[in-house]
Amino acid sequence: MPGTLVRQSRAAATSQTRATAVIVATRQAGPVRVALISDIHANLHALEAVLEAIDEEPPDAIWCLGDLVGYGPRPNEATALVQERAALCLVGNHDLGVLGRLDLDEFAPDAAESARWTQTVLRDDARAYLETLSPQAKTEGVELYHASPRDPVWEYVLTEEVARDSFEVTEAPLILVGHSHIALAIGLVEGHLGGGLAPEGTEIDLEDDRWLLNPGSVGQPRDGDPRAAWLELDLGAGRARFRRIPYPVERTQAEIRERGLPDALAERLANGV
């Protein structure tokens, strides 16, 4: 996303004034340190690597922004592991497609093919868990969306226009989104919209401004870095840090090919696109 700053609307300025008070008030209870994951896409090896890294300094909770299945070869195992570990989880568009709640003709051909394959192998317990999930949630003064506040299922937050609209449709001081598979930090900082890609190690001060953060993808990154991505949140200290870790990409690639899924889904994992 371009780093160009744009003028903040009066409504957004009013929301920003409230932001710090809201975030402080909601930090009095509930999890303080959160590991945020998203877009696992049935990539078990990537998920296991991320969870192992998270467990080195265990947070109070793990939150997931959805798309547990689709594209990848291990939907049952990935879903079971997220169900076991995540205190809060959303449903994504690929999950909804596999459940038959979205028309797969709306998906790209490789995505639709992998979703149809997933439908044939998904166990009843995994399906039942996915059926319980929503594409959006509010907790601890934070709003979570699989895609965007304006369209929690489909809309990508990748342009200044969509980012600005996202801040205007909610007064939340912190907005968390997934879906694009691109790690982003977009802020209303001192009255202006700015930000962009958030590579590994990027740290954000959440205390005085409003932020929209995307942790990137665990199982299919698309920002040029093939390593599995997640986000560390410290709601008590008002800090966020973007993280990456390598995983055995070749094992997931082999499993994709063994199951007869489109080869492009294996190839892209090596390049993070």
Image (cartoon, rainbow, N blue to C red):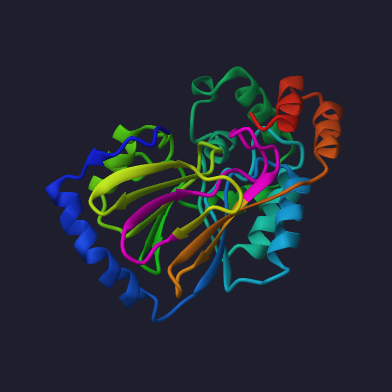
Which quarter shows the N terminus? top left
Q: What residue is rendered at 50% in x and 74% in y?
A: 31
Q: What residue is rendered at 12% in x and 49% in y?
A: 10
- Find residue 114 and report its image quarter: top right
Q: What residue is rendered at 67% in x and 34% in y?
A: 119
Q: What kind of secondary structure does the magenta stretch mostly adopt? A: loop
Location of residue 61 in the rendering, given as x and y in whole percent from the top left corner: 57, 69
Location of residue 115 in the rendering, given as x and y in whole percent from the top left corner: 64, 30
> Which stretch appears magenta?
205-229
The answer to whether 114 appears left or right of 191 in the picture is: right
Q: Extreme bottom residue here?
A: 28
The answer to whether 140 appears left or right of 34 in the picture is: left
Depth order, front residue of 110/198: 198
The answer to whether 49 appears left or right of 37 in the picture is: right
Q: Is residue 10 magenta?
A: no
The answer to whether 181 appears left or right of 160 in the picture is: right
Location of residue 85 in the rendering, given as x and y in whole percent from the top left corner: 66, 64
- Find residue 209 and report its image quarter: bottom left
